[in-house]
Image (cartoon, helix red, strand yellow):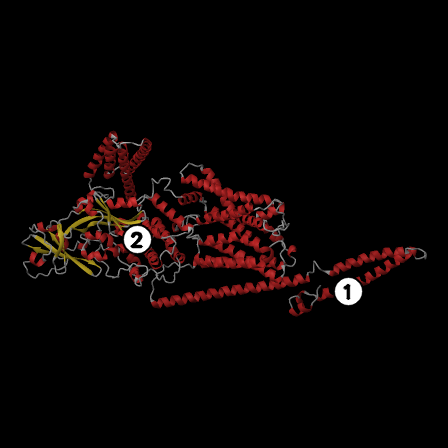
Amino acid sequence: MARLRSEVEEGFIVTHKIWKSKEEKSIKDSVFELYQLMNYEENSALNQKFKIIIKSIIWSLQIVSLLWIPDLPVKNWHKNMIIWDIIGYLKFDNTCSMLGVFDWCFYLSMLLAYGNFIVLIIFVIIIYYSYPYPRLALNIFSRIIYIWLNFFLVPSIQIFSIFLKYSFLPKTKVSEYENHSELGEFSMVSPLQISIVFAILITFILKLFQVEFSGEIRHSVNKIKINAKAHSKIDVHIAIFTFFSPIVYVMLAENYIIYLQILVIIFAILLITETIELLPYFSIFLNSVILIRLYFIGFIASIFLLGSLMDNSLAISMLAVILVPLSAIFVIQFSLKSQKETTQAIPEDLIEIESQYTLEKSLRYALCSNDAEHKDQIIRVFENFFIQKGLNGNKLQAIWAANYCLYTLKDESLAKIKLSKTKNILDWSLESNYQEYLCQKNISNTCLSEDSQFSDYFLQSIIVKNEEKQLCINLLLFWSEITSHEPNLPKLRKKLYSIEDEILLLNKKYDQLITKFPNSKSLLSLYHSYCKDIIYNTEKSISLEAKLRSVDKALKNFNGDSKEFSFFNENNGTLIISNEDRNFGEIVYADQKAAEFLKLPIGNIENENFSNFIHPYYKDKFREDTKWFIHYSSFSGMDLSKGFFLIKDGNILLQLEGKVLLTSINNLLMAILVFKPKSSKHEVALISEAQEIICHSDNFSKSIGKSESLVGLSLKNLFFNSEEISLQPDIPYHLPSLKTYIILSYSKFYEIKIPYVILINDYDEVLKWKNGISQSNNDQIQAPTQFLSLNLSGSLSSNKTDGSFNKGSQNSDENLNSKRPLHKNSKEFQGKNADDISEKFGSEKSVTSVTPRHNKLLCLIKSSSRSINVLHFAFVFSILTVLAVNITVLVYAFSNINFISDMRLPINIGKAAKNLQRFTYVSKLFMNVVYLPDNPALKQIFGDVQSCLTDLENTYIDVTTNLEKWNYCSGQNILTEKKLKHMECR
């Protein structure tokens, strides 16, 4: 116990579930807990889809509105920008500009940024100190921050950027808005500029938090939650793109709008490629939505770029209206097809898998399957990838495996083992740390299995013992101060209050433990001793003593039902063995019963290496096999009720039975062994190849009438009077002089056969051996390290490895891919026989393994299908391209002809009518004054008549010319290149 207590004092083992003081609870955990409470999700799949579609549409149109400015340098832009103006008003900053309240929208955005951040800090403080809070307030806050970051992020960032930009410019009119809004006459002093920078930074942090802390990455919920995903990598990249788009727009749009459009196209292509490669969501629907919206903004940006280069605004609108719907159909089909073709095979060759994201995608089909039929293969692939490439500073791989073990395999201890890989990984990713927190919390909250409860009980009892020890030290210091010559009264008063608080807290913890584990004899004894000898609570100690007697009587009358090897049955002995590299195999805890069964004091057991209690043949393989079990086993424990051996003092063989659990206690790998002596009717001795006794059980000598140790004696001299007798394996041989039977058998350990002999006095058991009922003697007498080495059955694997588990080992791939047999009795412990799995899927081959010839055929088929897909894509793309070019030419031609807006014939006809009317009026005036030669108006009227005649003559010429051109410009000549070059339709 000394070793474990020292580790507690050094901080290696700390309780992970309850009794954490406020100082021990970290700010990071408080933030994680807050976001876990804020992650509200609709239960209805229809509601989830509706919200996703609405959010995607608004996001896409807001990003698209950043692709132009009101004064876009494209011909006739103001005549054809109505549809784009409508889209632009989806951003509330445009609405604010139109209504003339741009300044107020700025103040509102600042209030949202700083207000949400302050409220977030308040809630973190409340959770950190465990203060009560109104749930309604948290729900309102979570809704406000959700709506702001999903629907008003782009306009808020644009407003911040515009105010910051124009604070450094002498002008106050904003060119980014159509009516050139005034920013106001207020002075943009440095504090305001700094506050805007902080507001932008706060908004970025809150958006990043929202994306990174958006829910659990559990494959088991793929059919329940539409927005369930494997990771947030794509979402983070989209969030960064969304955040910086309005900033770049404010910087470049006024003078370099084309460069902005090119940047949007590039980022859209990169995000589309990454999304197709990783497919972050389990839902085909949601992956398709992401691809469609990214395609939409990329395609619209391409159209704007083409329209700018053509200097034609009508082409932009026409291409957007016609080509976007047509190509969207193709994108949807391509998205669905690419996701349905996702491989369902579990990869065997990990060389081509570059990252853990690619690994997850290749395993996704099996991970999302809830029947756990591929569990051995999945765990093997995860571990091989980890050993070959490590976690690379990212904990997600270990978290995927832990969630799979917890929710699909229903094995909490195995989940703890997988999650313990993250303890030495320095990962700055918010998502990885958040998911690790969720996984640890889920494992702690589950704690349904007895072994998990025992781990929790073990930790809590150690903590209480440590605190009791500290209380005793403080009491001694207090007594020392009282008995001193000059007691320090203020110091005594302070220490007295401190001791009072410690006693009250310790009493509370003991009561909680006794309530939770009422049948723990050791815990009752500890509490009774505490009340009787330390705090002198006589009444409490008497009641505890009565309860202790009741529990002790119940344990003595225990009738050995299915709970015989319960972790809480204190008739059994318990050993806790470290599997950490720094003290591998060290026994860190042994209880009194374990010391009684091993016939050694506790001090001689604790701090000893477990390899000292096993057969010498197994010592070299002990570490390797334990490591293999930790890495590759698909279950965390095994039933050892049929017996196993331990060796004491080098030559005394102990025959025991029990069960073992491999787990992780506070991220420290441990093995918990529960055992008791096995009641048997035979005695056993391990022998060497020369048939000399290496060690034997206690009563082996007495069974043949000897009192001294028989270690070192040969079977020939001991049983056959130096005669050469050839014993056949597993066949009983009668010894008449000793009135017993001797059986030679072997325990196979890889290619090493360890011989041993059994002396049987019970004739019924001899008959079983003779009739072959016993199957294999190893079912009853098993290898000393079977609970760690997995060599628990008679037919052990003959595969041999060099035991290399180093990351950089050249032979690691061969060693770690070799599939060893699993324990045949694991069905009783875990609920599924590993041999059935091996029989169903093959012990050495994967489900997808094929012959080399079939491999070539599959490669040929795959390459052919890829070629067909490429040709199909090229064909459709060429048709769309030709269609786009034709439509562009038509638009260009008709815009040049422009019959409706620029037709001179009707205009000239109208001019002629007007001139004729004017000529009639002037002619009447001329006739009235022509007979008055001295009339001064005659000269002026004569000039008017001449002017009318000139206008009529010009109008006649224009009408005649336009009539000829009208007849000449037939529709069939519009598309003819020669005619277009020489036609002059204006």
Closer to the camera in the image, 859 or 574 = 574
77 sits to left or right of 689: right
802 sits to left or right of 903: left
* Residue corresponding to mark 2: 634
| Residue type marked 2 | Ser
Query: The C terminus lies in which quarter of the figure?
Result: bottom right
Q: Secondary structure at mark 2?
A: loop
Relative to 374, is 597 above or below?
Answer: above
Closer to the camera in the image, 465 or 64 = 465
1 or 2: mark nearer the eye: 2
Residue 890 pos. (x, y %):
63, 63
713 sits to left or right of 958: left
Q: Quadrant of residue 941?
A: bottom right
Residue drawn at point x = 23 percent, y = 61 percent: 798
Q: In the rendered structure, are the residues bearing label 1 and label 2 in contact, judged by CB atoms less than 8 Å apart?
A: no
Q: Quadrant of residue 928?
A: bottom right
Task: Using the numbered discs, state the Cα–Cα distance from disc 1 to disc 2 in whole angstroms.
Answer: 94 Å
Instruction: Name which of mark 1 and mark 2 comes first in the sequence.
Output: 2
Residue 79 pos. (x, y %):
65, 55
Dot 2 alpha-carbon crowd within 10 angstroms: few under 14, some 14 to 19, many 20 or more: many
Q: Secondary structure at mark 1?
A: helix
Relative to 842, is 174 above or below?
Answer: above
* Residue corresponding to mark 1: 960
Residue 90 pos. (x, y %):
57, 49
Closer to the camera in the image, 759 or 693 = 693
> Which residue reaches farthest top?
539
- Is residue 49 in view? no
| Residue type marked 1 | Thr
705 sits to left or right of 834: left
Residue 143 pos. (x, y %):
49, 42
Disc number for residue 754? none
> Which residue reaches farthest bottom?
978
